[in-house]
Amino acid sequence: MTNDNTVSRVEETRPNSESVVIFDTTLRDGEQSPGASMSFEEKLEVADLLDAMGVDIIEAGFPVTSEGDFEAVSAISKRMKRAGVAGLARAAAKDIDRCAEALRHARRPRIHLFISTSPLHMKYKLQKEPAQVLDMIASSVARARNLVEDVEWSAEDGTRTEVDFLCRCVEAAIKAGATTINIPDTVGYAVPEEYQALFETVRARVPNSDKAIFSVHCHNDLGLAVANTLAGVRGGARQVECTVNGLGERAGNAAMEEVVMALRVRGDSFPYHTNIDATMLTRASKLVSAVSSFPVQYNKAIVGRNAFAHESGIHQDGMLKNAQTYEIMTPESVGVSKTSLVMGKHSGRHAFKEKLKELGYELGDNALEDSFTRFKDLADRKKIVYDEDLVALVDDEIVNA
Ligand code: KIV
Ligand code: ZN
């Protein structure tokens, strides 16, 4: 195992055996999160940043659902310099035609079709027989393929679908011209080994499965979205669907920053690269949090306020000796300027002395010891001791010495 954070950005847009396509759905599945809706201008701002950071495909919306979604997909299609643009559509002619219309100006348009394939969804939601669903898959993919070259087909509730039927659906979609096959864990029900095996089985059993790129799309209802995403990649998926900050329906989708950094930091176990410039992850997180009004939890992996903060004395001491003792990636690698050693009741002498040095104080042994004792008293009363508190405390020590 190594800790090499020097992997450079690779400027490819199509996957080969070692690359994974990043399909960002912050503006579609992310925006479906209750209370996360974004204005037209905000969507353009997010799309521009996603494009600049190297996202391969941006799912910009669901054009048939509203005039606003149509306009956003259309405007984003016109302005993306590098990323392909996808729009979502059900297996219905009006959805597909509206989607193609919204994508008209995209350099690389993709129609993303979906239909439910699980017994539960077919019976209660669609009220259709499996044979009807198979027909709808064939006809919808064929219609979309007449309008654009790049068609993704998704088996909604794929992980609760009978495998034999799922294979027949995937076969029908590929036969009709689907270029990407997505098997979503729509309700976040899968566990990693099972999800990996599902991809292996479908890819092995479906004729011509190598003609399509397989895709993972995981929801986080059991907190397993990223683990399942990585398992799907192990099972042969080469496209990952994700959102910034894990924004999305219910408990959210797989978080882009976590997937990208897991692939990067654990390249020894997952030898795949993405085109993402990871130094832009923090900026993207802040922007999406601001426009969606969804705060990022403090201890969120990669982009949380505490992701590179250390308070305990033992950890701070280790960090001051060698940062790799308690950090598996550098803060700079994800766009954070530096590690922060937070001064609190768990902090030790080493960090205290370094912090004073940073603030411009070099105290003798006795003054340092007195100040440290007073700092610990203060830290017992306050959650965090700020730089201003330390300055006041040391100035007082100097005056009274
Ligand atoms: O979770 C899901 O199944 C989806 C599909 C529309 C791809 O978001
Ligand atoms: Zn979803």
Image (cartoon, rainbow, N blue to C red):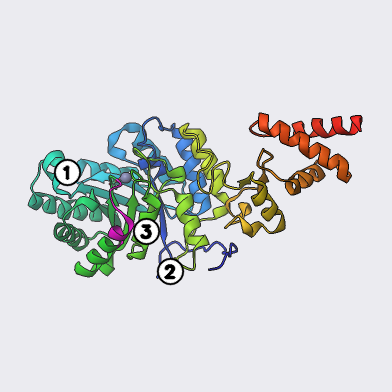
Q: Which residue is mark 3?
A: 239
Residue type at numbered disc 1: His
Q: Is residue 52 above or below residue 205?
A: above
Coordinates of residue 306 in the picture (x, y in percent) = 58, 43
Taking 120 as reference, is 19 left or right?
right
- Give the spatial CA distance, label 2 vs label 3: 11 Å
Q: Nearer the viewer, mark 2 or mark 1?
A: 1
Q: Amino acid at mark 2?
A: Glu
x then y, percent, for residue 133? 13, 50
Q: Is residue 308 magenta?
A: no
- Residue 358, located in which quarter of the rendered image? top right
Q: Which residue is mark 2?
A: 18
Q: Residue at x 22, y 62 (%)?
A: 174
Label 2 residue near ligand 1, CB within 8 Å: no
Residue 308 in the image: above or below residue 267: above
Q: CA distance from mark 1 to mark 3?
A: 25 Å
Q: Which portion, as a residue range, is magenta?
A: 188-196
Rendering quarter of residue 126: top left
